[in-house]
Amino acid sequence: MYAQGKTRSQVLEAIYGVDLPREAVLCFRDFAYSDGGVAVDWRYHPWELMIPPNEGKRAPFPINDYQSDEDALAYELAPNVLLLGDLHYFAEGVRLGGSLFGYDLDELRAGRTTVVGLLRKPIISRDARFTVLGPSIVDVLVETVTSYLAFSERLAERDNHEDPDPVREQLARVEALQRELNGP
């Protein structure tokens, strides 16, 4: 489709029935291919589809048989969900840590950026049910990284080998993206 002159928005709309919101484009730009962005394992789609062939080569997201099987099961359970990634931050007091998350395509079509997921579910099973995690990727990331920072700071008080600064930096990047998204 890119070779036919289609834009990224047109390609995504043709595949998913809706273009992805601006926050997804900003997450793609700032986090999807960045090791230092946030502690998220980004899924293969839609990120690989967002790279026009003329934009140069990037290392593709690795996808193994396990993830492929897991994605197939997730789409079987919830065909209206577009998987985006897995949140790390699995720790006490971090509500969304360890969750698989994505967009509800029906919500996107209705103009909302609702993020759904499998709460604290690093492994998908047949009995898994997607629930609303937050109103947007940015809100989900802010909540998760903020909670994890609080956990990290508590841990650092007891263990001088713990350093919450990398988490502070992650939160600063997410908040900068949030400001850009909400800016003038």
Image (tube, rainbow, N blue to C red):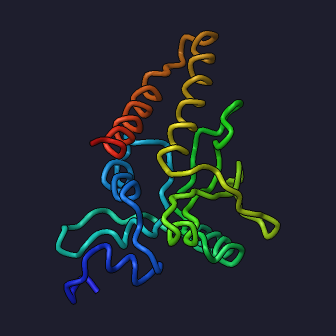
Quarter of the image with the N terminus in it: bottom left
Is 23 left, or right, of 97 in this rendering? left
**Does residue 169 sit above or below 3 in this rendering?**
above
x and y percentages locating residue 24 in the rendered image = 40, 58
Closer-to-camera residue (65/129): 129
Closer-to-camera residue (111/65): 111
**Does residue 8 sit above or below 88 in this rendering?**
below
Query: What residue appears at the point 48 percent right and 65 percent down from the top-left corner?
Result: 111
x and y percentages locating residue 175 in the rendered image = 40, 35
x and y percentages locating residue 38 in the rendered image = 44, 42
Query: What residue appears at the point 46 percent right and 67 percent down from the top-left corner?
Result: 44
The answer to which quarter of the image holds residue 173 is: top left
The answer to which quarter of the image holds residue 176 is: top left
Quarter of the image with the C terminus in it: top left
**Does residue 172 sit above or below 14 in this rendering?**
above
Closer-to-camera residue (14/170): 14
Q: Residue furthest bottom?
A: 4
Is 22 left, or right, of 121 in this rendering? left
Query: What residue appears at the point 56 percent right and 51 percent down from the top-left corner?
Result: 135
The answer to which quarter of the image holds residue 46 is: bottom left
